[in-house]
């Protein structure tokens, strides 16, 4: 199973539609669960990160292989990500991706991670990034099954 824990809710209809479409496509290959944690509004970054950390931790269990999405993480090609996903499922039943809030991910969550993944050194809106992650997960399954998919 793939679990995506993300801070914040999708507000715009077009982001929800994109997530729904990729979720449907991925469901042909594996079970997918998307968990939205509420974001916290505040001026103190540390307080915000602690609140979001507490929300995220509620959804992690000891069977999860945790992959945090961070600018500082390792960058992989689509093929490398597909191979990583494939090899991880040999030893883990749950792959859990974590997308933090506006201020990133609390240090404690980063330390819990088994792997830190970066899509780029650029910053993306969280709503867009959720769609990008789902697209790459879907692409991974297409690669692993030797199925054609646009480039």
Image (cartoon, rainbow, N blue to C red):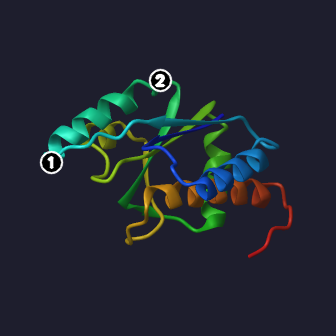
Residue 7 position (above or below residue 127): above
Residue 54: which quarter of the image? top left
Q: Which residue is mark 1?
A: 43
Q: Is residue 74 left or right of residue 18?
A: left
Q: Position of residue 73 (x, y in %)?
A: 39, 59
Q: Is residue 47 left or right of residue 110?
A: left
Q: Pointers 1 and 2 in contact (CB under 8 A)?
A: no
> What residue is shown at x 78% (from left), y 58% (from top)?
142
Which quadrant of the figure contains the C terminus? bottom right
Secondary-structure class at tag 2: loop
> What residue is shown at x 71% (from left), y 52% (from top)?
22
Q: Which residue is mark 2?
A: 61
Circle 2: is it few (<14), some (14-19), or many (20+) Cα within 10 Å? few
> What residue is shown at x 27% (from left), y 53% (from top)?
103
Residue 68 position (above or below residue 63): below
Which quadrant of the figure contains the N terminus? top right
> What residue is shown at x 78% (from left), y 50% (from top)?
25
Q: Position of residue 74 (x, y in %)?
A: 43, 61
Q: Position of residue 115 (x, y in %)?
A: 44, 48
Q: Nearer the viewer, residue 11 or 83?
A: 11
- Distance from the alpha carbon under mark 1 to that under mark 2: 30 Å
């Amino acid at each position: 199973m793939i679990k995506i824990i993300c801070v914040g809710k999708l507000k715009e209809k077009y982001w929800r539609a994109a997530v729904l479409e990729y979720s449907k496509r991925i469901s042909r290959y594996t079970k997918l669960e998307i968990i939205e944690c509420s974001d916290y509004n505040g001026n103190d970054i540390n307080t915000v990160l602690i609140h979001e950390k507490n929300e995220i931790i509620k959804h992690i269990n000891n069977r999860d292989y945790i992959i945090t999405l961070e600018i500082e993480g390792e960058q992989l090609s689509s093929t490398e990500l597909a191979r990583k996903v494939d090899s991880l499922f040999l030893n883990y039943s749950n792959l859990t991706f974590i997308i933090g809030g506006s201020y990133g991910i609390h240090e404690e969550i980063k330390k819990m991670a088994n792997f830190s993944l970066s899509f780029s050194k650029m910053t993306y809106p969280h709503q867009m990034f959720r769609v990008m992650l789902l697209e790459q997960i879907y692409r991974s399954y297409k690669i692993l099954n030797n199925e054609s998919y646009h480039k």
